[in-house]
Every structure is written in structure tokens, then in C-alpha cells.
Image (cartoon, rainbow, N blue to C red):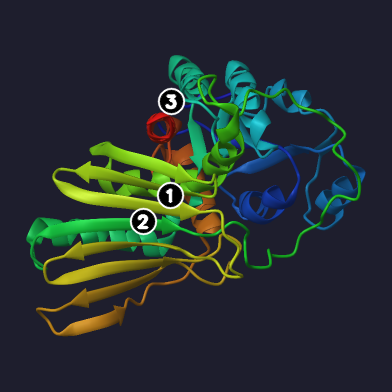
Amino acid sequence: MPHIATGQPATAKPVIGVIGGGMISQIAHLPFYLSDERVSVQAVAESRSSLVAHLKDVMGVGTVLSDYRDILVDPEIDTVIIIVPRQATGPLVLEALNAGKNVITEKPMAFTTEQAYRCVHVAEDKGLIYLVGFMKRYDAGIRYAKQRVDEYMASRQLGSFLYARFFDFAKSYAHKPPPHQRPAESRVVRFDAWPTQPAWLPEKHHAMYGWFVNTVIHDINLMRYFFGDGMQLDYAATRQERALTAYFDWTGVPVTFECAISETGFWHQGAEFIFEQGRVSLTIPSPMDDQHITAVTIDDNRAATIGKIEDIPVEWCFRSQAKAFIEHLVTGKGAVTLGKDCLGDMELVEDIWRQVIDKVRD
């Protein structure tokens, strides 16, 4: 069984085992790994009989196991994809890493920095790959926007960089997911779970913190994609446990973030990068929208070009993510959501919520 250290090419075709056969597994992972000749899907662990039939008869999975532990003890499987209830993700990641498997997992990687660090530490100690499913970093529009923003900062073509704003006012998918099989029965196998909030967080914040880590973590991850670890948190506060604002300083440039638990009937998420003579604006689609990528609009006052929507080839971000993950398994390159990098997301989340508590006490 090959153990692949981060950045090192595989010595054989990666053999994959998948834990979890629900919606996200069916639409965002399995189709791409099953169809890519660079990897082999050995088995899926799923105990719900209605999903077992779908996985075998419709998706073409050869082996479906009722016990996920059979994945972990299979000596031929070197990589495990984990798509389970989010409170169980961390413990299963740790179990898989300790079994000597490379791990690809859905977000959130954990609910606290300490939990996330435990997983990252084991992955690095054992020289294993640990990737987290922040698929928005693989969105072609977002990747294009980062390239343009970096270019404008370096060239000063649009003058000085003045301000950035990120926002997320979307609670539900607001878009019908691609076809999939929903389970007809309750979950049979129950997984171990870790606490879903840090011990220092007051109980009244638990519900919003859980939503924040599950959903808004995407926005935190995107801010760090554009600005790295150079953002310093100045202020964060929540009102009525329904909305939160945060303000950062990035090398003297203000960066703001706004979110609210809102269902307006459409997906409302995006970002703006403001320069002296122009702007780069992002309109991010629902993650279930497999026909669109992030729309990138560029205003360039010096060139008298206003509202220009960039023409970028469309590929669903989940497909792009799977291709990048496979590339990383095979060559050690291609992935931009390594567990050790995503650890910074959890650190920033905890910084924000400590500020929230301080403001409530004030």
C-alpha cells in the first residue's frame, strides 16, 4: 500500500475507499472518481439499503460495504474519501489517518482549532495526504479572479488597492441539486462525534456557531485564499444570533465580511475588490448549480471599460475539485486545500467568535 507524502508522486494507481453514500457523495465525488482512469474506487461503505441499491445499480459501484471499518483495514485501499455527518468528520479523519490512509474529506474539517490540529498533526507525522473539500477554491471564476486581483495589485493598472468586501446571505441551496437518491430509512450506522463548539463558547452562541462553521467557513476559506494569513481581525459582532459582521486589516487595506442567516429564494454570495480606478466583482452561484461558475465582472475606468463580464470556460466546481484532488494523489500537485492550510480557517473562526463574546460582554 503506497503512503504518499504531500508533494510526492504516487508509486501506483491510487485505490480509493469511500465512507458515506448520501447526496454529496453521489453528486460531488463518486461520479468523478469512478470515471477517472487515474484512480480506482475499490468500495463504498454505506449501510442504508435504499442507497446500496442505487450505488450498485445506478452508479456502478462494484462493492458496497455495511461497515466503514472494512474500508480502513483493506490493505489495497490507500486513500479514503469521507462524507458523513459533519460532527463525525473529525473522528473519522483521525481514525483513517491512524490506519495509514490518505484522506479526502468534506468541510468542515472540525469544529475547533484543537480538533483540526489533531488531524493535521497525525497526517504530517505519518507523511499522509489530507485534503479538505472547499470546492469554491476550485471554481474557475474564483481562480481567474484571484489571478486578476493579484495582477492589478502588482501592476497598479487600476491604481492603489483600497478595499475588499465579502458577503454571504444564503442559508439554503436555493437551487435544485443534481439527480440523486435520497435514503428511504434512517441512518443505520452511528459514528463517533466530537463537540461542535469550543468549551469557552457560551451556550447561547452554539446554534449560530454551528451554522457558521458549516456554511460560512467557505467564506473564511476564500478570504484566506485571496489574502493568506496576513489579515488581522479588528472587530467582530453578531446581532440576535442571525447576522454577523467582521472587519480586518490586510497590510493597511480594510477587508470586511458580512453574513446573515437569510432565505431570500436565491443564492446571495460574493465579493468585491475596490481599486482607485476600478473594481473586480464576484457573483458566486449556489454550490448545487452545476451549470454556472462564479461570474467575474471587471470595471476599468482608465480603459473606459465598465461592467465587463469575463468569458471563462464553465466547469462545475465539484468536478474541478475532484480533478485537482486526483492530480494531487497522482503527482503531489494541484490541490489548494491541504489540511495544514485549512487549519488557518479554524484559527480565524475562533478569533472571530472570541471577539463576538468580548463585544457581548461590553
Q: Amino acid at mark 1?
A: Asp
Classify residue 152 as left or right of residue 200.
left
The x, y position of residue 219, in whole percent, is: 43, 49
Question: Tag 2 or tag 3, which sits nearer the N-term?
Answer: 3
Question: Tag 3 or tag 1, which sits nearer the N-term?
Answer: 3
- Foreground residue among 198 and 180: 198
| Front label number (1 vs 3) | 1
User: Is residue 23 shown above or below 362?
Assistant: below
Do the residues under discs 2 and 1 have CB atoms within 8 angstroms? Answer: yes
- Foreground residue among 74 and 112: 112
Q: In what element is the residue under mark 2?
A: strand
Q: Which mark is residue 219?
A: 1
- Foreground residue among 143 and 357: 357
Q: Which residue is mark 3?
A: 5
Q: Which residue is mark 2?
A: 166
Q: Amino acid at mark 3?
A: Ala
- Foreground residue among 219 and 98: 219
Which image quarter: residue 307? bottom left
Identify the residue shown where x is 85% and y is 32%: 66
Question: Tag 1 or tag 2, which sits nearer the N-term?
Answer: 2
Real-space CA distance between mark 2 and mark 1, rounded to the nearest whole angstrom: 7 Å
The x, y position of residue 258, in whole percent, is: 40, 53
Q: Is residue 256 visible?
A: yes
Name the residue at the front extreme.
362
Which image quarter: residue 211? top right
Q: Is residue 13 visible?
A: no
Name the residue at the bottom extreme.
304
